[in-house]
């Protein structure tokens, strides 16, 4: 098989282009209010209750030694969900936060939502881009935090997530991940999804780490591969996990929304999934060699790990449901 060259962008070039277009050299941080931001944010739409509409995570009593966390949200035609995503970041009330929203030129009302929340955002861009991966790279080219994460505009964080990430980063972790909830948009059902064991031995297997529940040291950051349409997070983990000190948090950190346009649920994107898999195999051939024994080991290990991690989660999920002031119960572990 001929050698395959994986082209990754130079984020310094992206940053220079954004600065020339008027982006600030130093991003402002999200304003911090020791009484919380809930009272100063735009009011939620009528009838919206619970987290993150009329519930906020309590601000810390003191700043302490908090690392700067940079969150990038790529968005395109997601006005139905974008406001919930933005509020779930801001209402963390995290004291040292950069929050960048990179919209690909939406025409569905997203620009108006971004404008309403602009005073609390570190940077916004509403202009045509080359897709989700390009938008993520543009955002991280400007980010200056010591911890990174990206949050898609149809997902949202759970209360206290950023504070927990801050604590874990101080304990020497380079890559931090947790569990997630899955929200069925059509029924309103919430399901707990337990993450697998993200050991470097198993990086070849997709689905271990949810992007909305993953954070990493900025010193370990690498650009997202822009040829990837659906599996850009999985491919990024392949490159970032080896050599990283990995920490798992045994609780949901974010919520993934399942709706007809979700990439994993949209049959119209099947070709994109297949093309991504083909490119991954070319770029990482050593990971794609068939090793039946490793697949069997992986299956056994992951079943055991998820079973162990699910123990005792009933009480935690009930507490989370109460903390979020949600009426719908959270189904037990998947």
Image: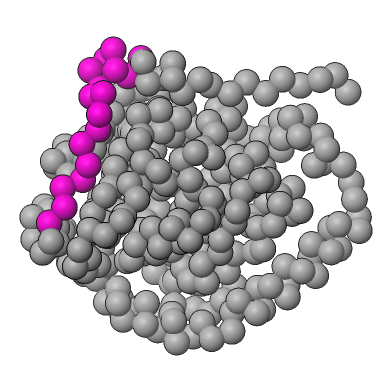
Which is the main secondary structure of the residues drawn in magenta? loop
| Residue 122 % position (x, y) | 23, 38
Q: Is residue 23 placed above or below 315 in the rendered structure?
A: above
Point out the image quarter for the N terminus: top right
- Give the magenta range: 17-33
Q: Is residue 62 placed above or below 42 in the rendered structure?
A: below
Which is more toward the observer, 7 or 181? 7
Say whether residue 321 is left or right of residue 334.
Answer: left
Q: Work out whether residue 65 can be spotted.
A: yes
| Residue 74 % position (x, y) | 39, 38
Residue visible at 30% across and 38% down?
100
Residue visible at 31% across and 56% down?
65
Say whether residue 12 is left or right of residue 292.
Answer: left
The quadrant where residue 300 appears:
bottom right
Q: Is residue 321 placed above or below 13 in the rendered structure?
A: below
Residue visible at 30% across and 73% down?
324
| Residue 154 % position (x, y) | 39, 50
Point out the image quarter for the C terminus: bottom right
| Residue 330 % position (x, y) | 44, 77
Say whether residue 272 is left or right of residue 224.
Answer: right
Which is more toward the observer, 80 or 61? 61
Q: Is residue 72 magenta?
A: no
Say whether residue 172 is left or right of residue 98.
Answer: right
């Amino acid at each position: 098989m001929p050698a395959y060259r994986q082209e990754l962008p130079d984020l310094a070039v992206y940053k220079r282009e954004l600065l020339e277009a008027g982006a600030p050299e130093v991003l402002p941080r999200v304003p911090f209010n020791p009484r919380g931001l809930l009272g100063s944010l735009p009011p939620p739409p009528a009838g919206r209750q619970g987290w993150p509409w009329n519930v906020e995570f309590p601000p810390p009593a003191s700043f302490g030694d908090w690392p700067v966390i940079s969150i990038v949200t790529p968005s395109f035609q997601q006005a139905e969900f974008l406001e919930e995503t933005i509020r779930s970041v801001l209402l963390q009330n995290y004291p040292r936060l950069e929050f960048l929203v990179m919209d690909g030129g939406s025409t569905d009302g997203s620009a108006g939502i971004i404008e309403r929340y602009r005073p609390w955002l570190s940077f916004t861009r509403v202009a045509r881009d080359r897709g989700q991966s390009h938008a993520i790279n543009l955002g991280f080219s400007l980010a200056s935090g010591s911890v990174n994460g990206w949050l898609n505009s149809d997902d949202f964080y759970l209360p206290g997530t950023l504070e927990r990430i801050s604590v874990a980063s101080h304990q020497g972790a380079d890559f931090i991940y947790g569990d997630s909830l899955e929200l069925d948009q059509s029924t309103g059902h919430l399901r707990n999804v337990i993450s697998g064991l993200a050991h470097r031995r198993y990086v070849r297997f997709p689905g271990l780490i949810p992007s909305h529940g993953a954070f990493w040291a900025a010193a370990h950051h690498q650009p997202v591969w822009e040829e990837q349409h659906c599996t850009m997070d999985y491919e990024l983990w392949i490159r970032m996990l080896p050599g990283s000190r990995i920490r798992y948090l045994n609780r949901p950190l974010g919520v993934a929304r399942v709706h007809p346009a979700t990439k994993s649920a949209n049959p119209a994107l099947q070709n994109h999934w297949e093309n991504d898999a083909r490119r991954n195999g070319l770029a990482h051939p050593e990971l794609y060699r068939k090793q039946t024994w490793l697949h069997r080991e992986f299956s056994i290990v992951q079943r055991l790990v998820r079973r162990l991690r699910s123990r005792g989660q009933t009480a935690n999920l009930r507490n989370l449901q109460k903390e979020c002031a949600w009426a719908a119960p959270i189904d037990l572990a998947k």
